[in-house]
Amino acid sequence: MKALVTGATGFVGPRLLRLLDGPVVLSRNPSRAKAALGTLAGQIVQWDPMQGPPPPQVFEGIDVVLHLAGESVAEGRWTAAQKAKIRDSRVVGTRHLVQGIAQASARPKTLVSASAVGYYGDRGEEELTEAAPPAHDFLADVCVEWEREAMAAEQHGVRVVTARTGIVLGAGGGALAKMLTPFKLGGGGPLGNGRQWMPWIHVADLARLYLHAAEAESIHGAMNSVAPHPVRNSEFTKALARQLHRPAFMPAPYFGLRLLFGEFAKVLFASQRVIPQVALDTGFTFQYPEIAAALREILS
């Protein structure tokens, strides 16, 4: 399977590239991507997602496009300018990618396009399979538009999977890196009352799940990309504290995090009991279905 990957220099990208054979990588800065990826990429082609479609010839011989590119939602406060970057990097970037696919003489069979569990918003105790409707807040609206742009590739004979990804846990970066310092200093604790559900996934499982979506022709549309056992924030906090041999009794109040992060604090406190029904129904096996084992592997 010959793959083309966008967003390859992010946290998930290198893990995914290790599972592929000489993939083509699209990057705004090929020299920086080459320095970051080394031999993981077979070919690196310059493409700025905001400037227009990639050259159609890059799709020659490509079976699957794995589209991971997008501005981080967790970097900096959500000013109007930052929210525009978050939206446009996903919506406009995906639109341009699909335009490039449409212009290609030989099109890929499959597009696996990242999306996010932000699609569901704050849903309390509700179990959320792929059939659940979207919320109506900033991130949910972005996800709806993002997925709509990806699904447009179906008009050109391409099977599309939109991978609604949860909190990605792994060594050396991602969400966990931001959490470790306060825990190691003994100042960790739940967010608020800790009752909110956290949809998480080990980065190794996520990379394998993207490939599963590429190979399983029965998968169309949304695919929740999370572990099969979501945990409450309090349970996650206790598991992380046990692994680090540190206490975890200092709850972080919403008001304080609102002052620190602004509107993004709402995302941290959202409850999303997301179930990967499509992955389970199509025979995907998780290496790390439980949070304790996942953290043990990551922090070992």
Image (cartoon, rainbow, N blue to C red):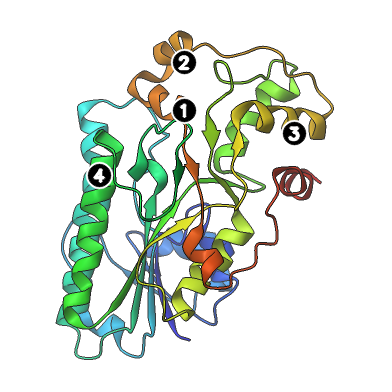
Residue picked out by circle 3: 239
Secondary structure of the residue carrying tag 3 is helix
Residue picked out by circle 4: 142
Kind of residue sitting beneath label 2: Leu
Density class for disc 1 (Cα within 10 Å; few <14, some 14-19, many ≥20) is: some
- Report how far apart the C-alphas of labels 2 and 1 lie in the structure: 9 Å
Instruction: Tell me: residue 222, above or below residue 23.
Output: above
Name the disc covering residue 268, or none.
1
Indicate left or right for 106 with 29 as reference: left
Secondary structure of the residue carrying tag 1 is helix
- Of the residues tagged 3 and 2, which is closer to the observer? 3
Residue name at image x 25 percent, y 64 percent: 150
The image shows residue 57 at horizontal and vertical percentages of 25, 85
Residue name at image x 61 percent, y 60 percent: 205
Camera-side residue of 297 and 124: 124
Which of the two discs, 4 and 2, labels the residue nearer the N terminus? 4
- Report how far apart the C-alphas of labels 3 and 2 lie in the structure: 22 Å
Secondary structure of the residue carrying tag 4 is helix
Residue picked out by circle 2: 257
- Report how far apart the C-alphas of labels 3 and 1 lie in the structure: 18 Å
